[in-house]
Image: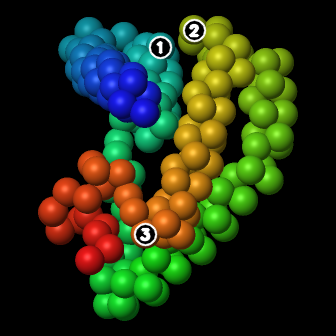
Amino acid sequence: MNKIRNWANLIARWSNHLTAALLLSMFIVFIMQIVFRYVLGWPVLWTVEWVTIAWLWGILFSFAFVIKTSDMIRLDIVYYAVPRGMRRAFDVFSGLVTAGIFMWTLPDAWDYVTFMSIERTAAFLWQFDLVFSIYIPFHIAVIVRMLLIAWGGIAGNRLPEELETHPESHTYD
């Protein structure tokens, strides 16, 4: 089990670097866009396209591989207002419902991503199935995360990194 966690931490660390590189590239290209458009008077299309694609990949890639479950947004004011057993029930219910919806829609998401191979982006002429391909790992990551949250509610335990004591964490104390 430790080998799996070490491997997952290594992937998360490299994914974190990739996400940071995407954000840096967005910033640099955004500055280039300003210079091209307002200083040189050359409006360019590829800068807008790159920022859009990098933003899409940054958001979906970081959810799939970077952020911890404890960093996900929750409605904590309600969650912490109820007793421990009800919080566990919330976790089981929300985890199973969300995972179920994402499992049910996975074939349709796959069909849509593969269907988009018929279109290309305007500037780079990349096939849209490549642009949207990050959605499939994101979709699968949501399913896995939600099932882990549901299991944590059923078993009453969480991963060690989810038990950190900070205001946003979920502890079953």
In this rendered view, identify the residue nearer to me: 57 or 9: 9
- Mark-to-mark CA distance, 3 and 2: 49 Å
Q: Quadrant of residue 37?
A: top left
Residue indicated by mark 3: 156
Report how far apart the C-alphas of labels 2 and 1 lie in the structure.
7 Å
Q: Say which residue appears at 28% left-offset and 69% top-offset.
A: 171
Residue 134 in view (yes/no): yes
Residue 77 x/y as whole percent? 31, 83
Residue located farthest toward the front when viewing the structure as drawn? 1
Residues at discs 2 and 1 in contact (Cβ within 8 Å): yes
* Residue shown at the point (50%, 78%) measured from the top left: 90
Q: Is residue 114 left or right of residue 59?
A: right
Nearest-to-viewer mark from 3 and 1: 3
Q: Would you name the residue on which mark 1 appears?
A: 46
Residue assigned mark 2? 124
Residue 67 versus residue 38: which sits nearer the camera?
Answer: 67
Compared to 94, does 89 lie above or below? below
Q: CA distance from mark 3 to mark 1?
A: 50 Å
The answer to whether one can see residue 58 in this image is no
Find residue 160 and report its horizontal and vertical position in percent.
28, 50
Q: Earlier in the sequence, mark 3 or mark 1?
A: 1
The residue lying at 26 percent from left, 59 percent from top is 163
Of mark 2 and mark 1, the one earlier in the sequence is: 1
Check disc 3: other Cα within 10 Å, few if <14, some if 14-19, many if 20+: some
Foreground mark, 3 or 2, reads 3
Percent x, y for residue 132?
64, 28
Tell me which numbered mark, 3 or 2, is placed earlier along the sequence.
2
> Which amino acid is tagged 1?
Trp
User: Residue 72: percent from the left, percent from the top?
Assistant: 37, 56
Q: Say what amino acid the circle numbered 3 marks.
A: Gly
